[in-house]
Amino acid sequence: MSQLYIGVWNHKDQFGNFSENGGIFFDRNSKIMFNLQILNASRSELSDKQIHVFPRELEKISFQDNFYDDNETRRETLKNFIEGKIFIFKVSEEQQDNPYAYDIKMHIKNNDFHNDDKFEEIPILMDSENNYETIKNKLIKGETIRSRAVSMISNKLDSISSFMITKSSHDENWILFENVTAVSTDGMESIQYQKPSENFPITVRRIVDDTAMDGYYYDNGDDRNINHNIMFVPTRYLRENDSQLEKFTKIVTRRLGLTENDNEGIDESSQDVDLLFLKQFHEVIKSSEYQLLLNEDDIIKLHTSIKSSLLTILAGLSGTGKSKIIKAYAEALGILNGDLGKGQHNDIPEERFKFISVKPSWQDDSDLLGFADTISNNFRPGDSGIVDTLIDAKKNPRFIYIIVLDEMNLSRVEYYFSQFLSVLERSSSERYLTLYSKYLETRLYNSDKYSSKILIPENVRFIGTMNIDESTFELSDKLLDRTNIIELHTVPFYNKKDISHRSMKDVKSANTWHNFEVGLLNYSSNGGSLTEEQLQFLWELHSEINDELPNVGISWRTIRSIDAYINKVPSTYANDIGKILDWQLSTRILTKLRGTESMLNSLISYDEKEKKPKGKIINILDKYSTLSDFQESRKKLLIKSKELKVNGFAR
């Protein structure tokens, strides 16, 4: 694996502060070096790290350092050399805590470079066996595409670009495939994309005006093949509402393999898979079988969380229909047991919705997963059936699987779900659960079916429900760090008139009914991410909280999770990122503010005179009011401040 990255000089000094010559320093031998900042749009464990450029790599890009100059002059010389440049490079894998760049290629920044640009790494699948015609046929058939470019992009399926580039064989025009979804890759030379369908149509565009793309960059090819492998394109060219796509491309077809008529009779909303699904979800929840009334924001929170996080928790009053909401969500996806797997869908697995009722007696993960019976020499999977569901999900990567943990805090989540919490944050290829010791594999008769380790694949999502009352356990920070908790709003009872009397049979028999595959989870309509101002806000908030509560704050894990959430929000909310930031602040950060009045007094307290909360956190929210009105966060802080006043502590 030799993924390519794009980046610029990182101006942060060793303390994380920006300065004019920050990020330029000397090694132990007094040789000068500098740090790079990665600008790839896809998130990775390297995204927020400073990438070293060692002196030997500087020499390779023709920088000449004069040892006889004083250090300030040497810094200034290097600054003049790297300022105004953009770099394409690989990153060492053996030192993740101290990563360095190599195979560096230097380019002059184009006129359209923006300081806040993020770049999409689009593979150029064009070599002796690939051109537009062959790739088009492979996409339609769902066949594997082989190319050296695969080794230069991320090997994480949810980070692979939804764009792909090749050339037409007859007129040499660049062809851009849009809305492609990777379903498998060996990370080296082959990649397979999801077949186009009514739910996931692929758009084909011809690039007609290169001059409208001033901000893109190529890798420099290699010695064996002078063709380029990667095109780095600013996400604003591809994702934003005023996208330049229409300026430099012409649509060939919006539905590859389904229709060749350019734009004729095409419903534009069908190109947005989120909106297509949400429309269907609304139909399901209002049907006569479900009769659910949900706050619109809660619907978006649920859908975005399931897309961006492996674990989502629904919390609320007993009787609010949390379990029923999840079942309706699965129904809208088309994955309820018995929905599919028959007739024309005989290639679709049936058991893709697993409902597990958590028992108060559960003490460790063997209650959920099972155990190795060394008397009979067999692995005994748990009654929950979760192991068989995970095995089935790995065999069927195209399809979404949902595992529900009902009333998950009847027992301590950190006990029976401990392994899951440890692996959920790992990369998709490393999420292995240990079922039993590996040395027992040769002794167990059914180890061919139940190996010692089992993978949690990308197409699985866990959803928990919980009541907050005296019969349940509180949640630890370890759990709060790894999930979105959605506290359901109560919709006014008089809105019952909005419930439809249309049956699910009628809903499903309509021509508009769709069954959704795994591409829905990877779909991003906006490609958004946290801005520099939002990151500055979160840093100030972390500093204030951490000063008062040393073991509490905002971790890099939380930042990555918020970033992923913003990236997956539906297009209807893409212009209201302030609200999205408020949601994440309320659920991921403020939930950790627990303790006595003396512990929290400076951060949050109740103002008797103004009848509202006050404190350092409120001051920060006021300071950054241009980012959001923080309506939900202020409500949560009001509740906590009242708890502190009345009870002397906050839960």
Image (cartoon, rainbow, N blue to C red):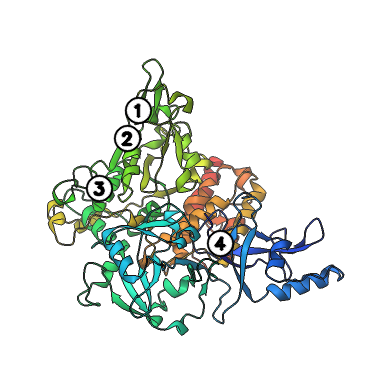
Dot 1 or dot 2, earlier in sequence: 1
Name the mark on residue 26. Answer: none
Dot 4 or dot 1, earlier in sequence: 1
Residue on which the image places disc 2: 388
Q: CA distance from mark 4 to mark 1?
A: 49 Å
Q: Nearer the viewer, residue 386 or 603?
A: 386
Q: CA distance from mark 3 to mark 4?
A: 42 Å
Q: Nearer the viewer, residue 387 or 288?
A: 387
Q: CA distance from mark 2 to mark 3?
A: 16 Å
Count neighbours of disc 4 (C-alpha within 10 A) and say few if under 14, some if 14 to 19, many if 20 or more: some
Instruction: Tell me: residue 624, above or below residue 470.
Output: below
Residue 501 in sight here: no
Is disc 1 in contact with disc 2, using a CB cutoff of under 8 Å?
Answer: yes
Name the mark on residue 381. Answer: 1
**In the image, is 573 to the left or to the right of 213?**
left
Q: CA distance from mark 4 to mark 2?
A: 47 Å
Dot 2 or dot 3, earlier in sequence: 3
For the residue marked with disc 1, what is the amino acid? Pro
Please give the name of the residue rendered at 33% of the width and 66% of the height, measured from the top-left corner: 135
Is disc 4 in contact with disc 1, using a CB cutoff of under 8 Å?
Answer: no
For the residue marked with disc 3, what is the amino acid? Ile
Element marked by disc 4: helix
